[in-house]
Image (cartoon, helix red, strand yellow):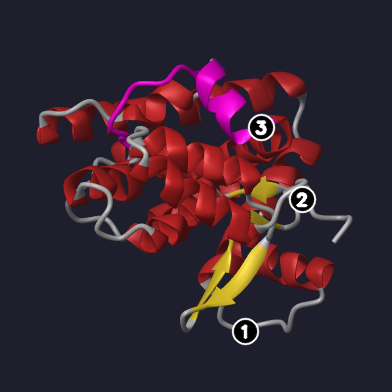
Amino acid sequence: MSTNPLVAQHTDSEAILHLREAINSGANWYVALLEAIGLWCSAAESWNGRHYSYLIAGQAFDWLSLAERLCVEVDGLIPEDEKMNLLFWASPPVELSQKEFHHLIGEVKYRAYLNYLYGIVVEEALLAAVEEEVSKERGCFAVCDHEEAEAEAYRRIYGADLQTLLRSFQEATGQAEGSHLTLNQYNEFTYWLFGYRVSLSEKARVASDTKKALDWLRGQWAAAAAKKGNPVASARYLPRA
């Protein structure tokens, strides 16, 4: 799998073994998890009746999906509440700097993680932020049609309606037109939208949109943190816009 940027000088079994042994030896489970992620090599797998896709479009690394998969291997060895906070809130049990996170998962995976962050997480945030702007402009948060606001957001960001964009994506990727998107395909579509937007926009517009999306994300995470009474650590791994 030479085209897979997750390939390392180890096997997935070695990554799992390292995780178990590190936790059993008293290492912090989250640090051990990130080390295991750094050792992992498969971009996707079907395991225990479920298909996992860790690398979107061959470029964007969904590290939390791999974290979820690895947590199953050490079920009972890690605190359930800490695991849930990580997987559902991206809030780990210990604070690590962006540099430490980078070091533990490795250079190649970190670059692919940034692709996922900007190409999928931030792209979804941009859509949500613009949709909110549309709703505010029309003064209809409570009553206006969500689909109408969403449709306008697509037009403002990409200059086309959702169906047109979907057809272009499916043509570009060889998928059957009109077929229902799986979660993985939806992520691929979002990543494709990111590339499409960047290719059409001037650098200043891309930077402005990125800042808008990051500000929206930080606001959402801050609100979630206040509601939970805990810091939501996702923002710690957000590079500055």
- Farthest residue in the front direction? 25
Q: Earlier in the sequence, mark 2 or mark 1?
A: 2
Q: Residue 102's quadrant in the figure? A: top right
The circle on residue 7 is: 2
* Residue 222 left/right relative to 163: left
Rendered position, 121 above or below 181 = above
Give the label on residue 106, or none. 3
Mark 2 in CB contact with mark 1 (< 8 angstroms): no
- Picture coordinates of residue 12 (x, y %)? 63, 59
Query: Disc 1 marks which residue?
Result: 179
**Mark 1 Cα within 10 Å, few/some/many (few <14, many 20+)?**
few
In this rendering, does residue 217 appear at all?
A: yes
Is residue 93 rendered magenta in the image?
Answer: yes
| Residue 37, magenta (yes or no) | no
Residue that appears at 72% across and 71% down: 167
| Residue pictured at 52% horizontal, 20% vertical | 100
Which of 204/226 is in front? 226
Secondary element under disc 1, as helix, strand or loop, is loop
In this rendered view, identify the residue nearer to me: 132 or 2.
2
For badge 1, the amino acid type reads Ser
Mark 2 residue type: Val
> Which residue is pictured at 83% across the width and 66% down the height?
172
| SS class, disc 2 | loop
Quarter of the image with the C terminus in it: top right
Q: Nearest the camera: 8 or 134?
A: 8
Cα distance between the residues tagged 2 and 1: 31 Å
Whether label 1 touches label 3, CB < 8 Å: no
Residue 226 location in percent, x, y?
Answer: 14, 27
Residue 126 seen in the figure = no
